[in-house]
Amino acid sequence: MENPLTSAPKPVIAITMGDINGIGPEILAKALASRQIFAHCIPLVLGSHSALEAQRALAPALPSATVVERSALNAPLHEDRLYLCEAMQQTPQLRPGVPDPAAGACAVAWIEEAVRLCQAGIASAMTTCPISKDVIYQAGCKHTGHTEIVASMTGVEDYRMCLFADDMRVVHLTGHLSLRDALDAITAERIVSSARIGHNALCKLGLKRKHIAIAGLNPHAGENGAFGTEEATIIAPAVAQCREEGLDCSGPHSPDTIFKRMQEGEFDLVVALYHDQGHIPLKLIAMDLGVNVTLGVPIVRTSVDHGTAFDIAGTGRARENSLIAAIRLAAKLAQA
Amino acid sequence: MENPLTSAPKPVIAITMGDINGIGPEILAKALASRQIFAHCIPLVLGSHSALEAQRALAPALPSATVVERSALNAPLHEDRLYLCEAMQQTPQLRPGVPDPAAGACAVAWIEEAVRLCQAGIASAMTTCPISKDVIYQAGCKHTGHTEIVASMTGVEDYRMCLFADDMRVVHLTGHLSLRDALDAITAERIVSSARIGHNALCKLGLKRKHIAIAGLNPHAGENGAFGTEEATIIAPAVAQCREEGLDCSGPHSPDTIFKRMQEGEFDLVVALYHDQGHIPLKLIAMDLGVNVTLGVPIVRTSVDHGTAFDIAGTGRARENSLIAAIRLAAKLAQA
């Protein structure tokens, strides 16, 4: 049954299991067992049925999955039901904590299938459980991670790695680059496009105020040029251009207080100029609620903000909070 | 009366009032009114008596100060008493929120007097209230801040800017440099000396475990060289040298999780490779408890971790917590 208060049906979210020997199956089973995600979406797991069922002792309330073939997914899916598609993968034996290229190959196949389901309109968004860069490399995958696979399959080069956690939202100018290369990649054009991408995300989230704060690069944002010139030569002109375009933008702000100010409600989103400028604060305060979001690609993709955690796989100690937050955010962005 | 459980008398802490038109007088009055600092030290304010007394409406419990001349400070000071020395400064009219070079000149004179009192052994440590870089520049001071004045007067060039907040402690390789210059200043030698300086501080604090974590520079500490080489060429060799010297060191650790791990108790101190790598996380979570510490100089100097806040000076909204934490830390480091 659809919620009578809303006109839209619940979105189908394709959820990839990730590396079956990491904590993916466990957090997935726990998230599905909590049942709160069924209020927001129809979950369609891309993964191994036996790996999911193996978690039942850790998550006794895990609903039984309706296992479907890829070809059956063209028909409408029912609300309040859990779907699982193995996408024709022969899952290797489950060995928690043991990296296995065969498991890496399955993980990549499920990601690719999720992208295709989004592109076909069968899923409204995708949420990913963690994979190991090393393991997928051993499995022959030429990409370094989810974001790169999604970008490649959707033909997008100018995507943005973002972290969202409650009312803290950061769009990063660049992702996995050395800090020196990241500094060379800072351009006014890239700052402006990051602000545009962030603005669009805030629109999708339905925020009335969409105040975007642009971080400075140097200590205290250069303290009027005393240490560093990028604020004057690159960042301030970019902020001016954003405002000319009608974006509600300010900056450059001192990097060491901008995140506190966002936490206190002054800003709705921060554009961070390099990976760690945004990752250090968000990972520190997000607790288990951080969600990794790929923006700038034509599909909605969210992810947990942690790795495979091979060291605790199979122990029952993994927490599902980030996955639940990622699925809820995917559903919200998908319904915009 | 000395505490009968401890053999050492309470240390005299020279506390500079900072810019009288900022929030210095207010946080000082509030901190002294709370009286908790008298349990840890004998406070000796370097500042304006009338500026302090002007705060009495905001801090009714402010003890009356014994106003002393500099020459009277050679005699022993009494516990449970508040001392104030104007150091022969003619304080200009108090104008909260209005920058005034004459106030800047006083602030600098008080800092210089505090350093001399520490050097003479009359004070065991100094704690500073905020000054404005712009205002002291207008007052003819050639230094850019407290740290530079202290370093210059003690003849030290290789000092370190540090932030302490509860059990979170960060030694920064460099301070007020542009990020590009800071990257160029990263050397194994500087990392090792930072770890030594940090180790000494942990010794003074009386910590049994002194586990120092060295941050990486690049995202995920370079992920085995995939993005950035400094971890392999500079940082790892520095960690090895630290361990050879007998320091309890580890790293390079991923910058975006190292502070969370310290917060959870895994590390006692982090060596951060540039200003914002440490300032962003500490300022985010320290709330009002962050203390700025200058290490590597021959005197103990702590400071609040905020500025003059001219915008709220005189409104009664300033919080004294960081100043209390700074005085308590100074007392603790001084008694080592």
Image: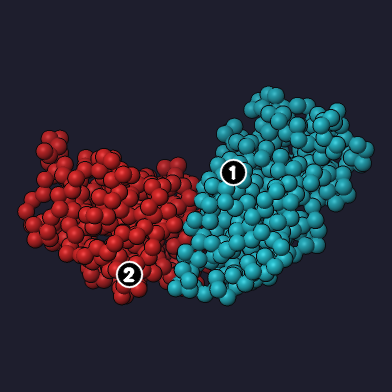
Chain colours: A cyan, B red
Asked whether residue A175 is in view, the answer is no
Could you say which disc has been placed on residue B101 in the image?
2
Asked whether residue A299 is in view, the answer is yes
Compared with B65, B92 (above or below) is: below
Q: Which quadrant of the structure image shows residue B301?
A: bottom left
Residue at the location (10% across, 56% down)? B73
Query: In terms of depth relative to the viewer, which is nearer, A257 or B92?
Result: B92
Compared with A78, A172 (above or below) is: below
Compared with B201, B185 (above or below) is: below
Q: Position of residue A110 (x, y in %)?
A: 78, 46
Q: CA distance from mark 2 to mark 1?
A: 57 Å
Query: In terms of depth relative to the viewer, which is nearer, A240 or A105?
Result: A240
Q: Are marks 2 and 1 on the same chain?
A: no
Looking at the image, the residue that sits furthest to the left is B75
Judging by the rendered image, the residue that carries numbered circle 1 is: A309
Kind of residue sitting beneath label 2: Pro
Q: Badge 2: few (under 14), some or many (20 or more) residues near its Cα, within 10 Å?
A: some
Query: In terms of depth relative to the viewer, which is nearer, A234 or A241?
Result: A241
Q: Position of residue A198 (x, y in %)?
A: 69, 56
Kind of residue sitting beneath label 1: Ala
Residue at the location (71% across, 43% down)? A329
Circle 2 chain: B
Specify whether B79 is left or right of B220: left
Specify whether B57 is left or right of A288: left
Specify whether A262 is left or right of A137: left
Residue at the location (67% across, 37% down)? A324
For the image, the number of numbered tags is 2
- The mark lying in front, picked from 2 and 1, is 2
